[in-house]
Image (cartoon, rainbow, N blue to C red):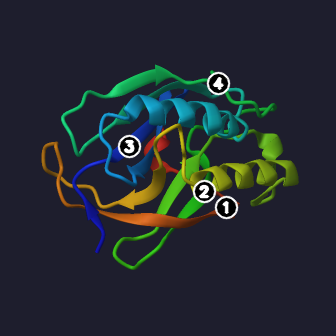
């Protein structure tokens, strides 16, 4: 059972589909256990991943901030504006709870697989209960981003699934599971926590 007491990072992407705030949390482990590298991780995620996420969100979605936290240390959070301010999908924006799913496949049975729910997208991105071809292609680009290591100079950040602890930080002996692959689910879904009525 792999555990770590250092070098664990979370990235929280905050978006807004008025009046709802939409959050996605991504977990990474610096493979050498290096601490204090939140700015480096945030910068590469912002430049390499955020623009691809923008390409699966409607123009009615504002992309606000990235917050990089290091729960295995007492280091302060690193907060930065996103490199892209709005989604790029044109057409009528779907309600805030409409989402596309990417499954983060676990490497072992010690945790469940993870999921990311991205949205909302545009009405033009849907063909019945599945996605239109260009939107599906954009989802697959994001999935590819989420299954590879991020490697700013001097660091290797591995995408992981984390069993969160309910104790105050700093956490120790945190169970993590490397992401073996990220799979797009070609069907529409909803994220009930994002409903506002």
Residue topped by disc 2: 101
Mark earlier in primary sequence (3, 4)? 3
Pick the residue in front: 42 or 161. 42
Name the residue located 76 percent from the left edge and 47 percent from the top edge: 138
Return the x and y of residue 128 as percentages of the image width and height. 80, 58
Tag 4–tag 1 contact (CB < 8 Å): no
Q: Residue furthest right?
A: 133
Q: Is residue 184 above or below residue 83?
A: below
Residue at 78% across / 41% down in the picture?
Answer: 123
Q: Earlier in the sequence, mark 2 or mark 3?
A: 3
Camera-side residue: 89 or 150?
150
| Mark identifier at residue 94 | none
Residue indicated by mark 4: 84
Residue 124 position by quadrant: top right
Q: Is residue 89 placed above or below 145 in the rendered structure? A: above
Q: CA distance from mark 3 to mark 4?
A: 20 Å
Q: Secondary structure at mark 4?
A: loop
Q: Which residue is mark 1?
A: 184
Q: Earlier in the sequence, mark 4 or mark 2?
A: 4
Q: Are marks 2 and 3 in contact (CB under 8 Å)?
A: no
- Residue tagged 3: 10
x then y, percent, for residue 180:
54, 68
Quarter of the view holding residue 50 = top right
Res 109 visible: yes
């Amino acid at each position: 059972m792999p555990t770590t007491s250092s070098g664990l990072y979370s990235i929280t992407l905050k978006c807004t589909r008025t009046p709802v705030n939409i959050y996605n949390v991504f977990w990474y482990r610096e493979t050498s256990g290096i601490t204090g590298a939140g700015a480096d991780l945030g910068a590469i995620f912002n430049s390499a991943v955020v623009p691809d996420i923008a390409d699966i969100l409607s123009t009615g979605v504002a992309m606000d901030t990235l917050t990089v936290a290091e729960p295995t240390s007492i280091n302060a959070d690193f907060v930065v504006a996103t490199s892209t301010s709005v989604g790029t999908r044109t057409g009528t924006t779907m309600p805030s709870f409409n989402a596309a799913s990417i499954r983060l496949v676990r490497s072992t049975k010690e945790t469940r697989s993870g999921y990311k729910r991205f949205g909302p997208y545009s009405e033009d991105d849907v063909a019945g209960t599945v996605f239109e071809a260009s939107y599906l292609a954009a989802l697959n680009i994001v999935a590819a981003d989420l299954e590879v290591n991020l490697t700013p100079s001097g660091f290797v950040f591995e995408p992981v699934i984390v069993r969160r602890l309910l104790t105050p930080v700093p956490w120790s002996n945190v169970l993590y599971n490397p992401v073996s692959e990220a799979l797009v689910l070609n069907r529409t879904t909803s994220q009930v926590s994002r409903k506002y009525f």
